[in-house]
Image (cartoon, rainbow, N blue to C red):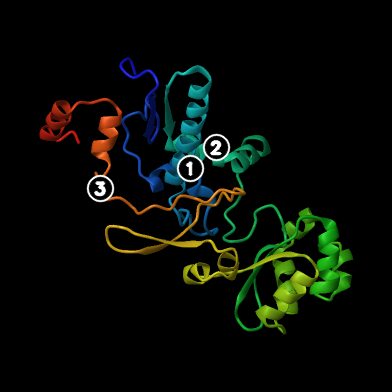
Amino acid sequence: REEHPRLIICGVSGYGSTGPYRDKKAYDLLVQCEAGLVSITGTQETASKVGISAADIAAGMYAYTGILTALFQRERNGEGAAFEVSLLEALGEWMGFPAYFTGYGGKQPPRTGASHAAIAPYGPFEAGDGKVVFLGLQNEREWVVFCEAVLQRSELAADPRFDSNSGRVENAEALDEAIEGAFGGLSSEEVISRLDGARIANARMRTVQEFLDHPQLKARDRWREVDSPTGPIRTLLPPVTMQGVESVMKPIPEVGEHTGPILEELGLDAERVRSMRDAGAV
């Protein structure tokens, strides 16, 4: 940055540039383990990693916001910046709820599969056609509506085992039996229809292919086709939808396609670029 004071430098590492883990190798799964995420994910019998690269994505998102902050700062004072993001600290930010639950509650949230550790009912329930419907309740008003309009068993709302969230969590097995007993005579579509009618949050358990074919994404025109070195591919628009702004969806470049123009923009002359290429630096 002495030569280029407006330059913004972002360093991403597994554990940061200092401390005892500075030189430790880091892959997404390993950082999930070190952050405690694996210990609260999965079933009671089996700890599991998250199905996407959560640590990598978290670090990338914080690098992105850090660069945007540095760009904004540079517009204010003309100066660039150098900063770092570690995968552990990025994922640690996302571990807020279980971290505080554990630190101030005395024990960590149990692994409960696709159910919620502290809210009930909240999770998967099987309908009569064998398909799984997910639902979630957030307050006692919704519990009463759920019993009356969805289960059509209004007496459950006042059952002393279920008349508070803590009671429902404590008696989760009996609660699940009551819900699936009511759902057993209904198809998944009928269950969802009742839930929607009662304004109870719910979802279908879709496969990845069903996500790709999701009617909401189609209705909102979220798919675009872009060129790539291997041919056209279908890709989603970025999730930020800004009025009057169309996202840039240019072709995916070849590896190194823009190296020359970037080095030229940085002010490196042709001879220096040639020497860098000869040395295998670029």
Q: Is residue 118 above or below residue 212?
A: above
- Residue linked to disc 3: 255
- Residue linked to disc 2: 93
SS of the residue at dot 2? helix
- The circle drawn on residue 58 is 1
**Cβ–Cβ under 8 Å for marks 1 and 2:** yes
Nearer-N-terminus badge (2/3)? 2
The amino acid at mark 1 is Ala
Q: Is residue 281 above or below residue 174?
A: above
Residue found at x 65% / y 54%: 117
Nearer-N-terminus badge (1/3)? 1
Most foreground residue, 236 or 198: 236
Residue 163 seen in this snapshot: no
The residue most toward the front is 244
State the image coordinates of residue 226 (x, y, percent, origin top left). Answer: 38, 59
Tell me where residue 86 sits by quadrant: top left
The amino acid at mark 2 is Glu
- Disc 2 crowd rating (10 Å Cα; few below 14, some 14-19, many 20+) is few
State the image coordinates of residue 143 (x, y, percent, origin top left). Answer: 82, 62
